[in-house]
Image (cartoon, rainbow, N blue to C red):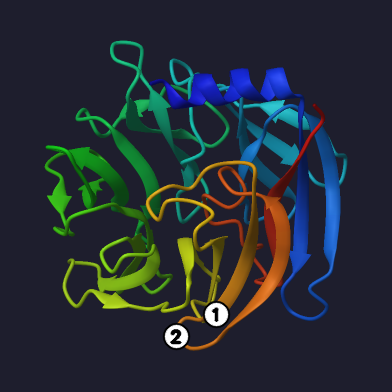
Amino acid sequence: MNVITERHKDSEKRNVISILEVVNVETTRERTMLKEFDGLIEAPNWLKDGKTLIYNAGGGIYSYDINSGNSKLIDTGICNHCNNDHVLSPDHQKIAVSHHTYEDGQSRIYTLPIEGGTPVLVTPIAPSYLHGWSPDGSMLAYCAERNGEYDIYTIPVVGGIETKLTDTKGLNDGPEYSPCGKYIWFNSVRTGLMQLWRMKSDGSEQTQMTFDESNSWFAHLSPDGKQVAYITYQKGDVAPGDHPANKNVEIRLMNAEGGEYITLVKLFGGQGTLNVNSWAPDGKKIAFVSYRINE
């Protein structure tokens, strides 16, 4: 099934309102609405200027100017069927996108200039869903289905041979490099519920980092590497290996060395809310998307 097409058809039918918000991590945990959108937008990235967000909508990639409230479509060439797995290069000069190609509708990863331009294919094997870019700019980390199993892989940004880092039954997803480049965080159902894990960037020392009775997804490291934001679904509300839209979820925050979490936000969302790293460059705010359905 072409997931992106089906979800956008559903959003049109059900009249989804997308609410782009930020939450203050440093002090009050206050939520601030930036803009409401008629229709579905997903997965904000924050540019280094602190004034611009990147999001996907309708298969396209957009930049949003926080000061003016205006959005602009980025020219992504043939990659006009992008999903919510898009990541910025460390210098923010490029963006990598996961695009559902026309020959089979499956997701493949491309890179292109952040201002728009000609996409370059990185992963000819599909499906591949991007989640991380190494701090030195040389490697991409992604979730991919190979031979019926979803695992974590890395590949040089310029393309080449992919390296498999996980090898457990069930879904392994959401790999993101720590700012120091030493670790890759990911989420895995290997213990029954979806939990956050951390491993060395070569795949060694895979270590469980969350242990609560929720399904935890998509670890996003703060710019200084000291904190991790992630999204959780209630146990029993979803299958552990599923992260659907239109659920009551939480955005949580924990120390990067593990330990107790705090809840930053409770919201109606899920898929599309926090799929990619959306920390502000100053580490004081996180951008996310909540949703409202007008039946």
Disc 2/disc 1 C-alpha distance (Å) = 7 Å
Q: Of 213 and 285, which appears nearest the observer?
A: 213
Residue 14, x across and y down, in percent: 72, 24
Q: Which mark is residue 114?
A: none
Q: Quadrant of the N terminus?
A: top left
Which amino acid type is marked by label 1? Met
Q: Is residue 11 left or right of residue 96?
A: right
Q: Residue at x 24, y 67 (%)?
A: 201
Residue receiving disc 2: 258
Classify mark 2: helix, strand or loop.
Answer: loop
**Mark 2 vs 1: CB contact within 8 A:** yes
Instruction: Specify few, some or many for label 1: CA neighbours under 10 Å numbering under 14, 14-19, or 20 or more.
Output: many
Residue receiving disc 1: 254
Instruction: Specify few, some or many for label 2: CA neighbours under 10 Å numbering under 14, 14-19, or 20 or more.
Output: some
Outermost residue, front side: 236
Up the image or down, 255 lies above or below 109; here it is below
Q: Is residue 181 visible?
A: no
